[in-house]
Amino acid sequence: MASAWTAPAAVLDCGTGFSKLGFAGNFQPSLVLPTAIALDDAVSKAASKQHVLEEHNVHIGQEAVDLALTHSVYYPVRQGVVDNWDQMETYWHHAFSRYLRLDPGEQPIVLTEPPLNAPENRELTAEILFETFNVPSLYIGMQAILALYASFICERGDQGKRQTLTGCVVESGHGVTHIIPVVDGFVIGSCIRSIPLAGRDITLYIQKALRERGEPIPAHMSLDTARLIKEKHCYVSSDKDKEAARRAATKTPLFHEGVDSRTGTHFRCNIGDEAFLGPELLFSPSAFTQEWTASLPQVVDSVIQSCPIDARKPLYSNIVLSGGSTLFKGFAKRLQRDVRRLVDARLGQQAGALEVCVRSHSMHKHAAWLGGSLLGGLPSFNSICHTRAAYDEHGPGICRSNAIFCDA
């Protein structure tokens, strides 16, 4: 039987919408599951915690989503932060046993966390993983730093060399968008900004547009169809008004075809301007809502400007994308152009000396998970983990801080 120090680390990146699960050393997660848990209605009302954990009473991932009509479905992560720890523990239990098929007591764990995660949350995480799952070692890494590391390795391929990590990470997933400046591997916490708009809001906008046009989509498939349209057909335009005029002039319809999950019948719906207006929510939010009016390029620029002056140039030159809501065609090009325009307007003739570069790579959808996988494969990985022995001696407070792995 493999020891805790020879078995590959399990890497878990649990986001608001989806969880990425797999093993260190791989370039893709083994599984991508909705971060959802379904409990039988009759059981969930009065069951004890031990009863809830029984295999036949609990479903997670897509199984949970598919049982929405007959079960209570819960989402333990809200806007990137664990909202219900009992549900999260149950989710981890089933992820380990039924999906990854591992004994957590025999393998190190790499777990990602959102920016500005409360230290108390790290302690709770440590308590659950060390005491309930008896893990031998644990590393909790901030998603932004892991994504930046993944970008560094994917572009340069020099995993074995020492380096510093500096960049501005734009992380946009299902529930929230974060802009996180990282200088030499350290997050400048006071400069982090969050935008309450992300993939979920784009999906809801598309769903609303389809409903208002009266597209023939089964009601129970409305949200899922909107999500599929977002993932398959949406793109970022350089100018929304010109793009609307161009599409009107071409008069070439774009359709999405689907199958009713209940009846098996096929349906087809027209895709209108929401194909480019959906992602535009991040670039021109004031055109859609008054609850948030600052565009993503404006927030990126203001974050970098709020950083120490000597860090601004390298931050502008390394704006790194992470998360599924940055995958739209044209996203990186539009963000780079709009940030460039803001810099030019402020600096005038001196702007040419300042490079603005938005970087993406083929795996930036799962960049945080990939960074954790690369970390878990480093020869120095064991030396930067919190071990069970250290936890037993010092308690969960040891997980309030984590080593900067690029300097390990």
Image: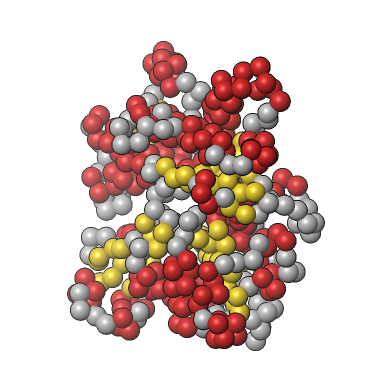
Indicate left or right for 152 with 105 as reference. right
Q: In front: 290, or 325?
A: 290
Determine whether 251 is above or below 4 in the image: above
Residue appearing at x 33%, y 84% in the figure = 50
Corner quadrant of residue 86: bottom left
Q: In front: 379, or 54?
A: 379
**Residue 354: x and y, percent?**
68, 28
**Residue 264: x and y, percent?**
30, 50
Q: Quadrant of the C terminus?
A: bottom right
Residue furthest to the front in view is: 309
Determine whether 240 is above or below 102 in the image: above
Residue furthest to the top in view is: 249
Corner quadrant of residue 62: bottom left
Determine whether 137 is above or below 212 in the image: below
The mark tally for this picture is 0
Q: In front: 216, or 308?
A: 308
**Residue 327: x and y, percent?**
52, 41
Residue appearing at x 34%, y 67% in the figure = 84
Indicate left or right for 96 with 60 as reference. right
Residue appearing at x 43%, y 56% in the figure = 80
**Residue 9: x and y, percent?**
62, 71
Residue 266 makes an appearance in the image? no
Q: Quadrant of the N terminus?
A: bottom right
Indicate left or right for 125 with 347 as reference. left
Residue appearing at x 51%, y 81% in the figure = 395
Protein image colouring: secondary structure
Q: In front: 278, or 338?
A: 338
Residue 9 makes an appearance in the image? yes
